[in-house]
Image (cartoon, rainbow, N blue to C red):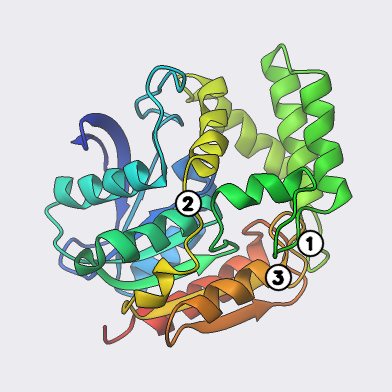
Amino acid sequence: MPERTLRANGIEIWAEDFGSARDPALLLVMGAGGQALLWPDEFCAALAAAGRHVIRYDNRDTGQSTCFDFATSPYTLSDMARDAVGVLDGFGIERAHVVGASMGGMIGQTLAIEHGARLRTLTSIMSSPSGASILKGMFGGGTALPGPEPKVMAAVAASTANPPRSDAERVEAAVRLWRALSGSGEPFDEAAIRERETQILARAKNPDAAQNHQLAIAASPDRDESLRNVTTPTLVIHGSEDPILPLPHGRATAEAIPGAKLLVIEGMGHDIAPRAQKRIAQAVVEHTTGR
């Protein structure tokens, strides 16, 4: 698992790859506030064992990548899509399979719209074709797609009302949110989540910068219409119990992209828990084989 720091799209991006560079490249793009480590090692290893050159990276404003003052240096999902292209360039890869989760799925969709020639396939996991309207939905605005469940908003409100002041409080807030995001398909492993979040916090240059991703989504247009021109073979994966981007968001993504296939995983929330992880890996391997 060699690590490297790339100069990509004018910034520094931390990246790590699994498997052989001779195999077809598969780029993993994580969601809002999420470091590369949210793609489990076991998931990456399974894809590499299936003959994929797997690359995961820290989005800007997370982990070891460049952090921004959004007030003076705002950006959108299009900028983050160019980061992904820069990562491919840094590895010398012309075309790749792209797998994005949550906001990472939005970035993947943006790649398919704006840089389609760089994609072999797209897999959009627990994501949405919406951009700025997602934030409106969270606060009761009139949108076609449903907003988050009360348990998610309660977890967010708790952290907003009493912002964490120490590393221990940051970890507790993260565990509380991941519990709210989980589905009923498998037990919530609090000890594992706590250990992961402690590791993530320890390698973050600026933990607060990750909040900029919400601003980037809010500054980006909805993609419903643009996705209708996408020709990249696309698989959409969504949990039946996603509490922040409910299943209609996944259905809308699949309906917007011509020829897209939809896989609904029963009991999956807005996370990549161990059992769902195996099903997702299998589906990604099937989707990317022969393309």
Do the residues bearing badges 1 and 2 touch, measured as CB atoms within 8 Å? no
Residue under the image location 15 percent in, 49 percent down: 89
Residue 229, image x, y percentages: 35, 76
Whether 4 is drawn above or below 226: the answer is above
Residue 247 disc label: 3
Please tell me in which quadrant of the rendered image residue 197 appears. Answer: top right
Residue, disc 1: 183
Give the SS element for disc 1.
loop
Amino acid, disc 3 = Leu
Whether 144 is drawn above or below 233: the answer is above
Give the SS element for disc 2.
loop
Residue 221 disc label: 2
115 lies left or right of 247: left
Residue 252 vs residue 184, the one in the foreground: 252
Whether 160 is drawn above or below 217: the answer is above
Please tell me in which quadrant of the rendered image residue 175 appears. Answer: top right
Amino acid, disc 2 = Pro
Label 1 and label 2: CA atoms lie apart by: 29 Å
Q: Which residue ends up furthest to the top in the rendered image? A: 165
Do the residues bearing badges 1 and 3 touch, measured as CB atoms within 8 Å? no
